[in-house]
Amino acid sequence: MTSTLSSPTLTQTQGSLPPAIRLQDVSKVFALPEGSFRALDHVTLQIERGDYCAIMGPSGSGKSTTMNIIGCLDRPSSGRYWLDGVEVSTLDDTALAHIRNQKIGFVFQQFHLLPALTALENVMMPLAYRQLSQKEQRQRAIRALEQMGLGDKTRQRPSQLSGGQQQRVAVARAIVTQPTLLLADEPTGALDSKTSDDVMEIFESLYAAGMTIVMVTHSPDVAKMARRIVHFADGQILRLEQVAEVVQLR
């Protein structure tokens, strides 16, 4: 199945730029004691630059495996993957780590903040791999926190922050390197409904600024904040859904 998600407006203005994500006939097989398990089965998917895509499906449907491959955290067993026009499916671990740090920001359900570090220090962490002075690292991290409305929380540790504030710190950490792609795995899964709305408003602003966003979620309401939804089942793409009307946050 060939699946293409694109924005007509973006496609018209981007000219010959390659898509943000292109998976071609990708399969992923895991070796288990009781035999092999095919997590992905010949998946072909294209997501254009600047798009906002949600991935949905039951447990074991292949959505998390797809995200791991898109995020250069894993490789396909077969098939090919291009990120911003560069084939990354055959790169070694060092090259994949470089791609992750340069192009991809990650947001996770459980935040993954280091408890001994302040919000500012957590956000600065990805910048340690950049050739930047300590001053520039701090300035960039402060700007990212201010963008999340947390300019007054730079010295707070995770235990001193609410769940919503911790997730906003995690988003600041994800965007501080100015990635072209933001990957979010159940970004609202540990949050109440009001805090979830706040986080999704941030995602909407990042999308409006031109960032490509791919998000895994179990929540239909959260998925409908995206512009397109990819439904997975049994390691394959079941269907694509164009969101007719973006849900208005209360």
Image (spheres, rainbow, N blue to C red):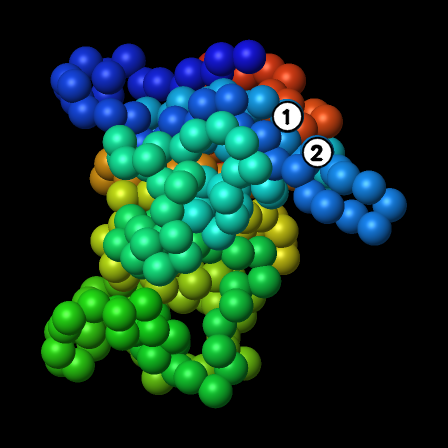
Name the residue rendered at 86%, 45% in the picture: 34
* Cα–Cα span, label 1 and label 2: 7 Å
* Residue 111 appears in the picture as rendered: yes
Residue 173 position, x and y percent, is 36, 64
Pick out the residue farthest to the bottom.
Answer: 116
Q: Which residue is mark 2?
A: 38
Q: What secondary structure is marked by label 2? A: strand
Q: Which label sits on residue 41? A: 1
Depth check: 106 or 221 in front? 106
User: Within 10 Å of the Cα at label 1, are there few (<14), some (14-19), or many (20+) other Cα atoms?
Assistant: some
Name the residue rendered at 19%, 74% in the picture: 137
Residue 101 position, x and y percent, is 31, 58
Residue 45, relative to residue 135: is it above or below?
Answer: above
Depth check: 165 or 50 in front? 50
User: Within 10 Å of the Cα at label 2, are there few (<14), some (14-19), or many (20+) other Cα atoms?
Assistant: some
Q: Amino acid at mark 2?
A: Arg
Q: Amino acid at mark 1?
A: Asp
Name the residue rendered at 35%, 60% in the picture: 94
Depth check: 245 or 211 in front? 211
Residue 28 position, x and y percent, is 61, 36
Residue 152, relative to residue 228: is it above or below?
Answer: below
Query: In the picture provided, is 4 more to the left or to the right than 220?
Result: left
Residue 187, relative to residue 119: is it above or below?
Answer: above
Residue 200 position, x and y percent, is 45, 44
Q: Which label sits on residue 158? A: none
Are the residues flagged by discs 1 and 2 in contact, CB closer than 8 Å? yes
